[in-house]
């Protein structure tokens, strides 16, 4: 990972560059993933991250709040442009009553990885803090690199080690059939809901960058609307998608406004891996939310029920 920093003009614009040995898509997604952001954006060694909320759409807002001793350091922002995986433009401030300043992030694919350039235009009242701001961004981009280098599938970086949802199941069916159950729309509609519930999809595009808008109907008439985006669809090995609470029109709704547990994150990332085991499949499901919280809210047992229903509908791999 290489880097350079500079200031242009009379110190009004801070420019920091980093090269990462990772695809541009992965680096871009790290800026919009609340779980990832909580590890490196405005995070300090002695601080305790208290709140990370992201509404990753143009006009959507983000909040990062870290407890630093007796002080709650808050950063507020709003997305102005989002163009995956090339460009993110936002504005942010440390106080809602002060003027926000624009931050532009551009990511250019390079051989063996990508190059990220961050430009921050300072409000004139903060020009005396230019060097401190540049140092802060330099540290942040270094921390982003360390987070990306962390082995997501290794013991120290796994969901199991971090206390997040981690489910491993051996399915008695070949890997290709299990993967198809997750990516064939007609099959997915038959099992992607807890037992006794049903699901409808108003939109379902199972391709990288594709989106979905769904509703789970419970026996008592309750409706659970959800939206998300498919980040990876790598047949037949891996599937990654996001999930956010929504309304019937497909608009994001904060979990609290939807009547959910206030600790439930604004967005979660679900990663499903499929490993061949003879004529069977070892399925590993990780979700970027506390497993204890998922069990308390019913999300964890819902996954277990859904996997049960899925397996019941698949042809056996024996024989």
Image (cartoon, helix red, strand yellow):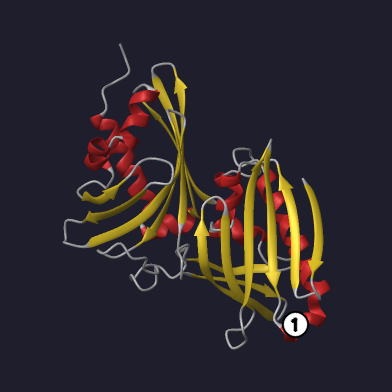
Give x and y (percent) for residue 123.
Answer: 69, 81
Give x and y (percent) for residue 101.
Answer: 64, 77
Q: Quadrant of residue 244?
A: bottom left
For the N terminus, the quadrant is top right
Q: Quadrant of residue 22?
A: top right
Which residue occupies 48% across, 56% down?
Answer: 292
What residue sits right under mark 1 in the picture?
A: 126
Q: Residues within 10 Å of mark 1 (few under 14, many from 20)?
A: few
For the C terminus, the quadrant is top left
Residue 75 visible, this orientation: no
Picture layout, residue 317 above or below residue 282: above
Which residue occupies 25% across, 41% down?
Answer: 191
Give x and y (percent) for residue 180.
Answer: 33, 30
Picture layout, residue 242 above or below residue 180: below
Which residue occupies 40% across, 68% down?
Answer: 261
Farthest-out residue, front: 9
Give x and y (percent) for residue 145.
Answer: 71, 50
Total marks drawn? 1
């Amino acid at each position: 990972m290489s880097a350079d920093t500079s200031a242009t003009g009379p110190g009004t614009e801070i420019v920091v560059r980093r090269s990462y040995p990772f695809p541009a898509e992965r680096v871009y997604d790290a800026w919009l993933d609340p779980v990832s952001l909580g590890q490196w954006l405005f995070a300090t060694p002695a601080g305790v991250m208290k709140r990370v909320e992201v509404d990753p759409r143009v006009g959507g807002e983000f909040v990062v709040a870290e407890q630093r001793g007796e002080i709650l350091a808050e950063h507020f922002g709003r997305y102005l442009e989002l163009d995956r995986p090339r460009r993110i433009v936002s504005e942010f401030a440390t106080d809602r009553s002060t003027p926000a300043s624009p931050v532009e992030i551009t990511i250019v694919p390079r051989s063996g990885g990508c190059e990220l350039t961050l430009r921050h235009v300072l409000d004139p009242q903060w020009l005396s803090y230019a060097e401190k701001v540049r140092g802060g961004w330099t540290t942040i981009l270094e921390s982003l690199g360390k987070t990306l280098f962390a082995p997501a599938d290794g013991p120290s970086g796994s969901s199991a080690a971090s206390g997040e949802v981690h489910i491993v199941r051996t399915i008695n069916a070949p890997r290709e059939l299990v993967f198809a159950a997750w990516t064939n729309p007609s099959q997915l509609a038959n099992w992607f809901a807890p037992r006794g519930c049903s699901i409808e999809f108003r939109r379902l595009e199972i391709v990288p960058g594709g989106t979905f808008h769904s509703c789970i109907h419970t026996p008592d008439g309750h409706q659970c609307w959800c939206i998300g985006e498919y980040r990876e669809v790598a047949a037949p090995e891996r599937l990654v998608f996001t999930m956010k609470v929504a309304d019937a029109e497909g608009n994001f709704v904060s979990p609290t406004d939807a009547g959910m547990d206030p600790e439930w994150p604004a967005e979660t990332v679900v990663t499903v891996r499929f490993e061949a085991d003879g004529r069977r499949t070892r399925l590993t499901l990780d979700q970027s939310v506390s497993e204890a919280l998922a069990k308390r809210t019913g999300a964890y047992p819902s996954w277990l029920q859904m996997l049960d229903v899925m397996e019941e509908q698949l042809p056996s791999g024996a024989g």
